[in-house]
Amino acid sequence: MEIKKLQKEVDNWIKEHGVRYFDPLTNLAQLTEEVGEVARIISRKYGEQSEKKSDKKKDLAEELSDVLFVIICLANQTNCDLEKAFFEKLSLKTKRDHDRHKNNSKLK
């Protein structure tokens, strides 16, 4: 699915189920909270921190989708075209980093 379609899906959902967007500062706080949940899962599942019993039921994909949802909300309410910005950034990174990572001895 294209990012524009995702942005439209979220906008439709907000209008139908969410009444309105939270203000950008609230969404920023929500984003921080969701990223924290992702960090917790990764640190316990893939890092050195031990899992608690309650952590075993947490789903990384679900938490990442929460992050994506809030990012799309922020983009929609601030009139950002994420699809355009993403492909512009990918192009920039491709030009800038094409040989950089291949020549990084730390990655070998």
Image (tube, helix red, strand yellow):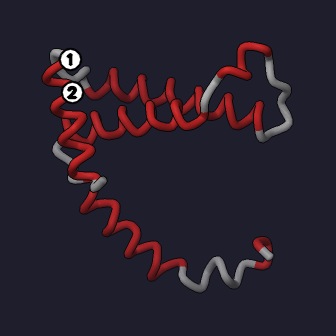
Q: Is residue 7 above or below residue 59?
A: below
Q: Is residue 74 above or below residue 99?
A: above
Q: Residue at x 14, y 23 (%)?
A: 15
Q: Residue at x 77, y 41 (%)?
A: 46
Question: Which mark, by number, is residue 17?
Answer: 1
Question: Which mark, by number, is residue 13?
Answer: 2
Using the image as rendered, state which of residue 101 and residue 18 is in the foreground.
18
- The kind of residue on which mark 2 rests is Trp
Q: Are marks 2 and 1 in contact (CB under 8 Å)?
A: yes
> Where residue 45 appears, x then y in whole percent?
76, 35
Q: Residue at x 23, y 43 (%)?
A: 7
Crowding around mark 1 (Cα neighbors within 10 Å: few <14, some 14 to 19, many 20+) is few
> Where residue 9 appears, x then y in whole percent?
22, 38
Q: Is residue 31 above or below residue 71?
A: above
- The kind of residue on which mark 1 rests is His
Q: Is residue 98 above or below residue 14?
A: below
Q: Is residue 28 left or right of residue 56?
A: left
Q: CA distance from mark 2 to mark 1?
A: 6 Å
| Quadrant occupied by the C terminus | bottom right
Helix, strand or loop for disc 1 = helix
> Where residue 65 appears, x then y in whole percent?
45, 36
> Where residue 28 appears, x then y in whole percent?
38, 29
